[in-house]
Protein backbone atom coordinates (compact mmCIF):
# COMPACT_ATOMS: atom_id res chain seq x y z
CA UNK A 1 0.00 0.00 0.00
CA UNK A 2 0.96 3.62 -0.14
CA UNK A 3 -0.20 6.87 1.43
CA UNK A 4 -1.71 9.78 -0.43
CA UNK A 5 1.01 12.32 -1.25
CA UNK A 6 1.82 14.48 1.77
CA UNK A 7 -0.23 12.43 4.26
CA UNK A 8 2.23 9.72 5.31
CA UNK A 9 2.09 10.48 9.06
CA UNK A 10 -1.72 10.26 9.08
CA UNK A 11 -1.56 7.05 7.02
CA UNK A 12 0.93 5.43 9.40
CA UNK A 13 -0.99 6.44 12.51
CA UNK A 14 -4.30 5.11 11.16
CA UNK A 15 -2.76 1.89 9.87
CA UNK A 16 -0.88 1.04 13.07
CA UNK A 17 -3.35 2.24 15.69
CA UNK A 18 -6.74 1.69 14.02
CA UNK A 19 -6.65 -0.62 11.02
CA UNK A 20 -4.54 -3.47 12.39
CA UNK A 21 -6.67 -3.69 15.54
CA UNK A 22 -9.86 -3.79 13.45
CA UNK A 23 -8.44 -6.55 11.24
CA UNK A 24 -7.35 -8.83 14.09
CA UNK A 25 -10.87 -8.50 15.55
CA UNK A 26 -12.10 -10.55 12.58
CA UNK A 27 -12.49 -14.27 13.43
CA UNK A 28 -9.54 -16.18 12.02
CA UNK A 29 -7.17 -13.19 11.83
CA UNK A 30 -4.71 -13.85 14.65
CA UNK A 31 -1.96 -11.28 14.08
CA UNK A 32 -0.98 -8.35 11.90
CA UNK A 33 2.32 -6.61 11.27
CA UNK A 34 3.33 -3.74 9.01
CA UNK A 35 6.52 -3.32 7.04
CA UNK A 36 8.18 -0.36 5.31
CA UNK A 37 10.36 -0.91 2.25
CA UNK A 38 14.05 -0.90 3.16
CA UNK A 39 15.41 -1.59 -0.34
CA UNK A 40 13.58 -1.33 -3.66
CA UNK A 41 14.18 -4.41 -5.82
CA UNK A 42 11.10 -3.97 -8.05
CA UNK A 43 11.43 -0.60 -9.74
CA UNK A 44 9.77 2.77 -9.51
CA UNK A 45 6.24 1.38 -9.08
CA UNK A 46 6.98 -0.62 -5.91
CA UNK A 47 4.63 -0.22 -2.94
CA UNK A 48 6.43 1.43 0.00
CA UNK A 49 4.41 -0.38 2.71
CA UNK A 50 3.17 -3.91 3.28
CA UNK A 51 1.09 -5.58 5.95
CA UNK A 52 1.05 -9.28 6.69
CA UNK A 53 -1.94 -10.81 8.43
CA UNK A 54 -1.67 -14.29 9.94
CA UNK A 55 -4.96 -16.08 9.36
CA UNK A 56 -5.80 -19.41 11.00
CA UNK A 57 -9.02 -20.87 9.64
CA UNK A 58 -10.42 -23.87 7.80
CA UNK A 59 -12.48 -21.52 5.60
CA UNK A 60 -10.27 -18.80 4.12
CA UNK A 61 -13.06 -17.57 1.84
CA UNK A 62 -15.34 -16.97 4.83
CA UNK A 63 -12.58 -14.97 6.53
CA UNK A 64 -12.01 -12.95 3.34
CA UNK A 65 -15.76 -12.30 2.92
CA UNK A 66 -16.02 -11.17 6.55
CA UNK A 67 -13.14 -8.73 6.03
CA UNK A 68 -14.84 -7.34 2.92
CA UNK A 69 -18.19 -7.11 4.73
CA UNK A 70 -16.62 -5.13 7.55
CA UNK A 71 -14.98 -2.78 5.06
CA UNK A 72 -18.30 -2.18 3.29
CA UNK A 73 -20.27 -1.42 6.46
CA UNK A 74 -17.33 0.57 7.88
CA UNK A 75 -16.58 -1.63 10.88
CA UNK A 76 -13.14 -1.37 9.28
CA UNK A 77 -12.62 2.37 9.04
CA UNK A 78 -11.36 3.95 5.86
CA UNK A 79 -8.63 6.58 5.93
CA UNK A 80 -8.42 9.56 3.58
CA UNK A 81 -4.62 9.28 3.67
CA UNK A 82 -4.67 5.73 2.19
CA UNK A 83 -4.27 5.51 -1.60
CA UNK A 84 -7.06 3.04 -2.40
CA UNK A 85 -6.49 3.41 -6.15
CA UNK A 86 -3.13 1.62 -6.01
CA UNK A 87 -3.50 -0.88 -3.15
CA UNK A 88 -2.68 -4.52 -3.84
CA UNK A 89 -3.86 -7.43 -1.69
CA UNK A 90 -3.71 -11.23 -1.95
CA UNK A 91 -4.02 -14.21 0.34
CA UNK A 92 -1.21 -16.75 0.30
CA UNK A 93 -0.89 -20.14 1.95
CA UNK A 94 2.28 -21.98 2.90
CA UNK A 95 3.51 -24.52 0.38
CA UNK A 96 6.51 -25.83 2.27
CA UNK A 97 8.38 -25.76 5.51
CA UNK A 98 10.41 -22.72 6.58
CA UNK A 99 14.07 -23.09 5.61
CA UNK A 100 16.65 -21.62 7.99
CA UNK A 101 20.42 -21.22 7.87
CA UNK A 102 22.47 -23.90 9.57
Image (tube, rainbow, N blue to C red):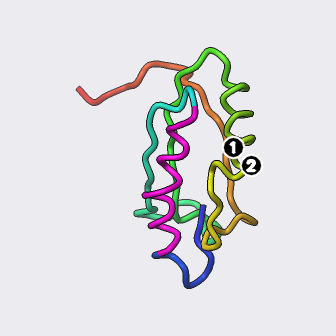
Residue drawn at (74%, 40%), measured in percent from left and top? 69
Is residue 47 in the magenta section? no
Residue drawn at (50%, 43%), measured in percent from left and top? 52
Give the x, y percent position of residue 61. Answer: 73, 26
Give the x, y percent position of residue 58. Answer: 62, 14
Numbered range of the magenta stretch: 10-26
Give the x, y percent position of residue 24. Answer: 50, 38
**Quadrant in which the C terminus is drawn:** top left
Q: Which mark is residue 97?
A: none
The residue identified by callout 2 is: 73
Instruction: Find the residue positioned furthest to the top.
Output: 58
Q: Is residue 83 above or below residue 20?
A: below
Question: 48 and 43: which one is in front?
Answer: 48
Q: Name the secondary structure under disc 2.
A: loop
**Quadrant in which the N terminus is drawn:** bottom right
Residue drawn at (37%, 25%), measured in percent from left and top? 99
Q: Name the secondary structure under disc 1.
A: helix
Give the x, y percent position of residue 88. Answer: 68, 53
Question: 20 and 43: which one is in front?
Answer: 20
Q: Are marks 2 and 1 in contact (CB under 8 Å)?
A: yes
Q: 10 Å neighbourhood of mark 1: few (<14), some, or many (≥20)?
A: some
The residue identified by callout 1 is: 70
User: In the figure, residue 84 lies in which quadrant?
Assistant: bottom right
User: In the figure, residue 28 lies in which quadrant?
Assistant: top right
Q: Main secondary structure of the magenta part?
A: helix
Question: 50 and 28: which one is in front?
Answer: 28
In the image, taking residue 3 as reference, residue 34 lies left or right, namely: left
Q: Is residue 93 above or below residue 2?
A: above
In the image, taking residue 93 as reference, residue 74 lies left or right, namely: right
How many numbered discs, if any?
A: 2
Amino acid sequence: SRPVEGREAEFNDWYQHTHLKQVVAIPGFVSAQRFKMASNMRGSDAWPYAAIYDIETDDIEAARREMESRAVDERIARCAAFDYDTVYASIYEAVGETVTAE
